[in-house]
Image (cartoon, grey):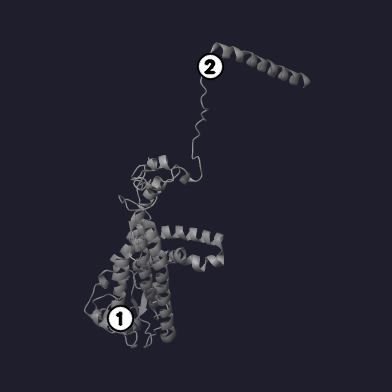
Amino acid sequence: MKTILCSMALCAGLAWGTAAAQAPAASAAAPMAPATPAVAPAVGGIQSQNIFQVKPDASEEPGYAQQTNGERAKVQPGNNAPMWRQVGEGVTGYSSLPKSQAPEAGNLIQPFVQYPGSRVTNAGEAWRQVRNQWIIPYGGALLLIVAGAIALFYWRKGMMKLHGAETGRKIERFTPFERSAHWANAIAFVALAISGLVMAFGKFFLLPILGGTLFGWLAYVLKNVHNFAGPLFAVSLVIVFFTFLKDNLPRREDITWLAKGGGMLSGKEVPSHRFNAGEKVVFWGGVLGLGFIVVASGLVLDMLIPGLLYERGTMQIAHMVHAVATVVMMVMFMGHIYMGTIGMQGAYKAMRTGYVDETWAKEHHELWYDDIRAGKIPPQRSAAATGEAPAAKPVQA
């Protein structure tokens, strides 16, 4: 160790001596140069944290407000106001991503718009205002009001029971194919409704109870259920529409049924064919009208429509349309589900087994029953189509 230290000291001494000996020689050989101020090496970056210490009066120069980000950096380094002003105005910057895969690459903030119910602001904020200030509070209130009205009606009126005694003679109201199409559509609708309600309103009534972790997993699972049930609902909706289209065509008797409210308040049912006017309103308004809107907007949100440019504005509009149409459809189907389960005696059994009693048909769909008695409609349609023997004794015409 001592040897190493001594060697280092000796080398340092030799180097210092050599430099000192060469310095006078260099001074003697060259003439005396005039003294020049030392120039500090250039240092990159901003020299001060306060950008106004560099040309603080730069804002008074002509054209200051129209400067580009590069021009602003020359007079006020670090002042990136022009760049962020362009970002806020929706100016698209450079991006190497292909337009087909990323149509809005380089565009951080959307341009200003005004959606129904929002202020004039950038599209992202406008969508947030519509969702949080209109769709969520008023949509939730509408669902609760309708649910409360149905509960109140059931509490005051109870189940609609048959006035006459059952005869034991059965009429086939729904064939196995019709019931399969209906149940597929109903199950998909319930899965979509529950998952959609949790995703939209869950943070208000489930998150405080379950906590963030468990609610996050639940929302994740239901989101995937929603995505998979959506195509099933769309396909089954088309099948249901064409399956029940013939018996849902408007008739003159439907006007009378609507004028009297179907006899819901009077207690005396209005004669109707296989489907009354109320069911036809659900069919045309819910299945066809709202169903088409919900399915179309859902396909946009799932990015399943080929050739469509999926920008944020497109998705925001699709979401608002989807949410509003879904809430209205759920309200409409809530009444349909009520009447098909606890609201009317024998209605659920008709969809479960396919058969209704002769008394049920006569009281609830008298014109349909008259057509069966007259031989215009076979009482056992599936047996007539397949050649099989009827499972129950049908009504005799």
**Upstream in sequence: badge 1 or badge 2:** 2
Q: Is residue 350 visible?
A: no
Picture quarter containing residue 318?
bottom left
Q: Is residue 30 visible?
A: yes
Residue displayed at 46% across by 46% down? 52
> For this view, does 21 lie left or right of residue 220?
right
Could you tell me the amino acid type at mark 2? Met
Q: Which residue is mark 1?
A: 365
Crowding at label 2, few (<14), some or many (≥20) Cα neighbours within 10 Å?
Answer: few
Residue 147, position as x, y percentages in the image: 42, 76
The Cα atoms of the two marked residues, 1 and 2, are separated by 121 Å
Nearest the eye: 316 or 87: 87
Could you tell me the amino acid type at mark 1? His
Q: Are marks 1 and 2 in contact (CB under 8 Å)?
A: no
Q: Is residue 61 above or below residue 5?
A: below
Q: Quadrant of the C terminus?
A: bottom left
Residue 342, position as x, y percentages in the image: 42, 79
Nearest the eye: 170 or 52: 52
Residue displayed at 32% across by 50% down? 309
From this viewpoint, which residue is outermost toward the right?
Answer: 2
From this viewpoint, which residue is outermost toward the left?
Answer: 252
Picture quarter containing residue 364?
bottom left
Picture quarter containing residue 181?
bottom left
For mark 1, give the secondary structure: loop
Q: Nearer the viewer, mark 1 or mark 2?
A: 2
Q: Which residue is mark 2?
A: 32
Residue 365, position as x, y percentages in the image: 30, 80
Crowding at label 1, few (<14), some or many (≥20) Cα neighbours within 10 Å?
Answer: some
Label annotation for residue 344: none
Residue 176, position as x, y percentages in the image: 36, 68
Nearest the eye: 115 or 10: 10
